[in-house]
Image: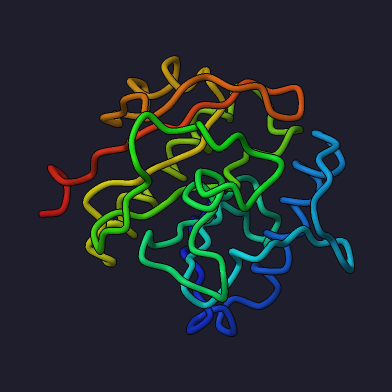
Amino acid sequence: MHSTTLSFANMHNHGELFVNLLRARRESFIVRNRWDLPETMGMEYDQYDTPQSRWLAVHDDTGRVLAGVRLTPTTARCGIYSYMIRDAQRGLLESIPDDLLFDQAPVDDGTWEVTRGFVVHDIPASLRHRVRMRLVLQMLRTSREEGIRRMLALLPSNWHRWAARCSLEMKAAGRNMNMGGIDYQAVWIDFSTQLH
């Protein structure tokens, strides 16, 4: 099992890994969750998949993606869009309630957003924790490389159950909300103590 952080600057070094990540996202969000999201050529994507973002993938030797997540700086800008959670709060996204956060969405160099997180559905229960931990360790590595002190994530509301097992300092950043039949909540993840 491997983990890789992809960017527009390095994705050419990793063969089809980025495409495989977008294919796995389509399987997770469009096929399994039945969300109405943009897709083409068997891949899911949106307006936040820009050169400003990073994509973390846990994958096997063949390039099959087992889990993934997208990180976007809260300082990102592309046309009228910034990052998903802030744009939802600004009323730009119909699919996410605008009252998802307790406070104003940050625009800060050391704060990045975490979205589109998934673990593929057919991973055996005995391996799920190992895959999740691999993804968390890659998030930690990337936070050190990018100088990320904290992340704002949109996660399934059961994040309490696995936060401690993954040794993450997390706390609620917003209310519980049902989106597409799944309960989600905005959550702060603190990486400031682990940047050394």
Q: Kindly identify the residue that appears in the image at 37 percent across and 46 percent down.
A: 105
Q: Residue at x 41, y 17 (%)?
A: 160
Query: What residue lies at 45% left-to-right and 15% top-to-bottom?
Result: 161
The residue that appears at 63% across and 38% down in the rendered structure is 96
How many dots with numbers?
A: 0
Check the picture and name the quadrant holding the C terminus: bottom left
Q: Closest to the observer: 71 or 85?
A: 85
Location of residue 142 by image quarter = bottom left
Q: Is residue 107 left or right of residue 15?
A: left
Is the image coloured rainbow, by chain, by secondary structure, or in one colour? rainbow
The location of residue 182, given as percent across then percent down, is 69, 23
62 relative to 167 in the view: left or right: right
Q: Looking at the picture, tell me which residue is in the foreground, 176 or 29.
A: 176
Q: In the displayed structure, does residue 164 sit left or right of residue 54? A: left
Residue 169 higher or lower than 66, as above or below: above
Point out residue 74 in the picture as x, y percentages from the top left corner: 38, 59
- Residue 54 position within the rendered picture, expressed as x and y whole percent measured from the top left: 48, 65
Side of 23 where 117 appears, left or right: left
Which percent across, then down, holds residue 39?
A: 84, 60
Up the image or down, 135 lies above or below 156; here it is below
- Splitting the image into 4 quarters, where does residue 190 fall? top left
- The answer to which quarter of the image holds residue 165 is top left
